[in-house]
Image (cartoon, grey):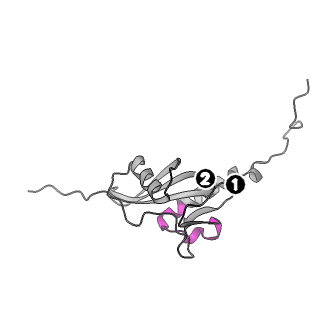
Amino acid sequence: MSEPSNPAPSWRVAALVGRAGSGDVLVEAAGDGARLPALPHSMDIEPFAADSLGAVEGMLGAPCVPLRLTWLPAEGWRSGSIVVELEELEAAPGGFRWIDPSDVLDSAEPPEARPVVRRWLDRRNASSPRSSRRGPGPGGSRGRPRG
């Protein structure tokens, strides 16, 4: 009796990158849709952070600082998608452009990354300077305590 074969791991890798000083997100320049930077083919790798980050750096053509990796496994946990969230960039690398993600959230590609993009956008909106302004609170001013 032969042992069951395990298929090779196969993972799609996409990057989620914000634009410094703005709410924009990086997408592929080709077409008018909102396709996150993604490798054209699945990778036959175990889902290790270093492999995913190396693939994203190769795709963007520059070293990147990872903030979060989200594994979105398919049935069987041997394949699926990995979304690599990166530190903000000032300029879009060649072949990419910036868009406002709220306009295309429901059509972002790859589709399995949409919940990750939605959470990312919620976190960015919650930490923006406009949303973090608060009044002085009970009892006084924001200035130096009076002595």
Q: Where is residue 43 in the image (x, y as percent from the top left)?
A: 35, 59
Span colored in magenta:
100-115
Q: Does the magenta run of residues contain 10?
A: no
Residue located 43% across and 63% down the image: 39
Q: In which quarter of the image is residue 138?
A: top right
Q: Which kind of residue does numbered mark 1 sit on? A: Gly
Q: Is mark 1 on a helix, strand or loop?
A: loop
Q: What element carries label 2?
A: strand
Q: Quadrant of the C terminus?
A: top right
- In the picture of the structure, the residue carrying the numbered disc 2 is 88
Q: Residues within 10 Å of mark 1 (few under 14, many from 20)?
A: few
Q: Where is residue 13 in the image (x, y as percent from the top left)?
A: 43, 59
- In the picture of the structure, the residue carrying the numbered disc 1 is 21
Predominant secondary structure in magenta? helix
Asked whether 21 or 131 is in front, the reply is: 21
Asked whether 117 or 33 is in front, the reply is: 33
Q: In this view, does 70 lie to the left or right of 11?
A: right
The image shows a total of numbered marks equal to 2
Q: Quadrant of the N terminus?
A: bottom left
Q: Choose the circle earlier in sequence order: 2 or 1.
A: 1
Q: Which residue lies furthest to the right in this view?
A: 146
Q: Is residue 80 above or below residue 34?
A: above
